[in-house]
Image (cartoon, rainbow, N blue to C red):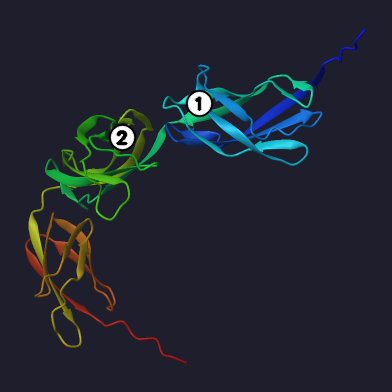
Amino acid sequence: MASQSAETRGHTTCAVEVSPDIVDAGAELTLRGKVSCSPGCDLRGHALLVKDQAGADAGRAELTTFDGKTNETTELVVTAPVEPGGYTWLAVCPAVVKEGVSYMEASTPISFTVKPHTTSVLAWDIPSAIVAGERFRMKVGVKCSNECHLTNGDFGIYDHEGTQVATGALPGDRWPGTTGLYVAEVELEAPAAEGLYTWSVKGVRSVVGIPHAEGSVSFGVRVVSHPEYVVTVETVDKASQTPLSGARVIMHPYKAVTDERGVAEVRVAKGAYKLFVSQTTYLTFGLPVEVTADMTARAELDVEPVPERN
């Protein structure tokens, strides 16, 4: 009677490294697989098959190296789902017969988390002081962590009580000199009462089908009473008595800059102030002033002393 050889069965295990394991919606994931056999076998030329959460094919990673114990794949780059949440895909090593040994199909889960894109929100060009009830303009900037196109992305501006006071949409062009910042200018109305208020900008949530985590930033709105008087500040070099243009004049919270004549006009409400005048290479000038009518103040600035060299 002829002899019949029994089939030898082998055992296969596989593992997959995922990078990153927390990924932005719609971004790239990199997978690298390893397959080990007992008894050891060379599986080069075969592949790990990747299935998504619905069981559909998501890609295949070719087994290209074997060190005598473990087979490794090349990197497989796949696109993450758009919907945020936790996902478990599957890597499958199909059954194979090698050198008379039958290796059963093996699989391993591929787990990762998809998160919305991060948005950074900026607010600037807010006037240092705004007259109660008057309108003012400011800039809002938004940037996506993946530098998404944010054209028509919406944002809202909220006052100190959390009430939405304005909305806006981002323009089609990026801010010059940046890689992904979109900037819009908005007009707002200051509160009717004096004080320092904390407002905020929030946005955007979804652009071109990609979810974005809502970013936010707070900014201050300083509201003052209507300026009643004009303080004319004449700024000169103390030694030469020549006018200093471009000097910064502050009567908190009011600000101005001197013109080519060294003159700045600051409109203020009645009250006591500390007048500060500063200019590059000069010592800052300070003077207490009591404003009860239109007035003129003269600021004579000393040049900063030059440190002696040893």
The picture places residue 190, in percent across and down from the top left corner, at 17, 41
Q: Quadrant of residue 261?
A: bottom left
Considering every residue shown, the one lying at the far right of the view is: 1
Q: Quadrant of residue 285?
A: bottom left
Q: Which residue is mark 2?
A: 203
In the rendered structure, the answer to whether residue 248 lies left or right of residue 75 reads left
Of the pair 247 and 214, the residue shown nearer to us: 214
Cβ atoms under marks 2 and 1 closer than 8 Å:
no
Residue mark closest to the camera, 2 vs 1? 1
Query: Which of marks 1 and 2 precedes in the sequence?
Result: 1
- Disc 2 to disc 1, C-alpha distance: 33 Å
What's the residue at 20%, 51% (across, down)? 127
Question: Dot 2: what SS?
Answer: strand
Q: Quadrant of residue 116?
A: top left
Considering every residue shown, the one lying at the far top of the view is: 1
- The amino acid pointed to by label 2 is Gly
Q: Is residue 14 above or below residue 124?
A: above
Mark 2, Cα crowd under 10 Å, few <14 / some 14-19 / many 20+, is: many
In the rendered structure, the answer to whether residue 231 lies left or right of residue 66 reads left
